Image: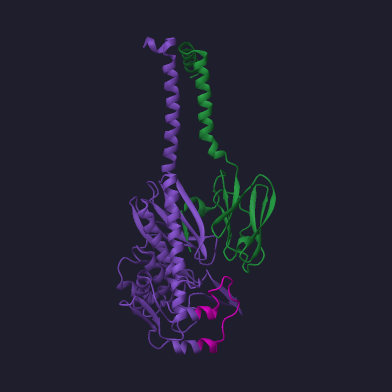
Chain colours: A purple, B green
Amino acid sequence: MKWLFAKRGSNLISLIFIVSLVYGAFFTGSNSSNNKKHTTTQLLMGTLVSITTWGVEDKKESKAVADAFLEIARVESLMSSHKKSSQVSLINLKQSQIVDKELLELIKEAQRIKKLSNGAFDLGLGKLITMWGFSTDNPPNKPPEDTEIASWLNEFKEGDGIAISEKNNSISITKQAIALDLGGIAKGYAIDRAIVSLKKSGVQNALVNAGGDLRGIGKKGDKPWRVGIQHPRKQDKLIVATQWSNGQNVDMAMVTSGDYERFFIYKEKRYHHILNPKNGYPAKSGLQSVSVQTNSATLADGLSTAFFVLGEKASKELLKQIEDVEILIVRSDGTHWQSKGFRGEWL
Amino acid sequence: MKNLGFKFFSLLKKATYPADRWVMAISAIILIALVIQPHRAGDEVSIYKDNQLLMNLSLNSDSITPVEGRLGEVKIEVKDGQARLLEYSSLRLIGTKTGWIKNRGEIAVCVPCGILIQIKGDKKPATTEQKEKLFDGIAR
């Protein structure tokens, strides 16, 4: 040990000291970047979309998240009825259009949900939504005339009106009253695609939130992702706290439909944006909101609209027919019901 | 403890030349500066139009910056270390109603204008807001 304190060993001590400091700094830096929660937010699909990741190196994270946002933007440009060049807009314009297989599959899935929900969910309501004015950035301030709605309904209610040809990869509209609006399902699909992109980039822990519709994978270190559900009447309050795993990795989506996101009051009456295809008016099903949990944001998105339109009784019936779907219903009087497997704790 | 520190420094003094001690001190200062430096970046507000970063404004000096949004002019006001979005042409004025934002990660947005502002830097995220503190996302 004598050499350690000899002057000639001093260079070695200095070296050890410096190496220790460098190692310490390096170790601390890498450790913190791997155990860090990153959230990046962009404006897409007419809403705020944030992607949160956990435990990914900074460089890899930036690239993975940028790719996931690009994927969402790609889905938007393919499926938005607000973009004139989208394939959905072209279907509406030309009444018949060859489309990407991806869009065809999503329209098939939407038709499946329509059938499952006995028409409570319908992707052909584009003209009705435009009539009500809910498709514009600024909300309407009065409802359309009853006669306008009656005339639309008269033509809409007969038959299906959307023809899918898998052979030609084409979608055709066969009724004047129909225009495609994938607003009730495309956001969920974009979330699912973002998750696929993140997984492809090697991200194992992430939460994608598109205007309050979410899907999460993995976990946040040793903790689960925690998501609150907003109170349908008090914007600053939460009604439910959900934990998305019991310390295990998770892959779950949660989508909420409610009468409070887009609405207007006319002559003291509330008109919201979830329209009932059976009568052309905002659904009056005795509910304020429905939250759906399942492993696909696409399915959760379509079903949340369907459940909201159906109301509590019919939703419970529908729930018996589908597996791995859990729901939480908030009734008009503020009371709630949740299915057995719904992950959430009422606050 | 005080004794131990004294012994350490006296051993260090015995075991090293003054030049070594200078090297060690300078290395330590450089490393500490390197570790601290990224976190000391000035707090600022980032302004985005259609998800493209337009500019960063320091929160340390008061300013009013006009930005051309999709619906016309939008102003970003910085005052007393906080920022707010002032829109004029959007019907619902959601961004304006958000009010002042000052904590890291906080956002004010005008969707129809395509303008988003977000606080960046080292200020701690809001801890008073229950949802910020406890949740990774809010379903709505």
Q: How many marks?
A: 0
Say which of A69 and A327 sits in front: A69
Q: Residue at point 30% right, 68% down? A: A323
Q: Residue at point 58% right, 74% down? A: A264
Asked if residue B2 lies in the magenta stretch, the reply is no
Q: Is residue B54 left or right of residue A295?
A: right
Give the x, y percent position of residue A91: 43, 78
Image quadrant of residue A145?
bottom right
Give the x, y percent position of residue B32: 52, 30
Give the x, y percent position of residue A170: 36, 77
Say which of B10 and A92 sits in front: A92
Image quadrant of residue A330?
bottom left
Image quadrant of residue A291?
bottom left
Asked if residue A138 lies in the magenta stretch, the reply is yes
Say which of A262 and A188 sits in front: A188
Figure check: A164 above or below A210: below
Q: Can residue A338 be seen by looking at this rendering?
A: no
Task: Tell me the magenta residue range.
Answer: A128-150
Q: Residue at point 61% right, 53% down? A: B101
Give the x, y percent position of residue A220: 40, 49
Q: Can residue B113 be seen by looking at this rendering?
A: yes
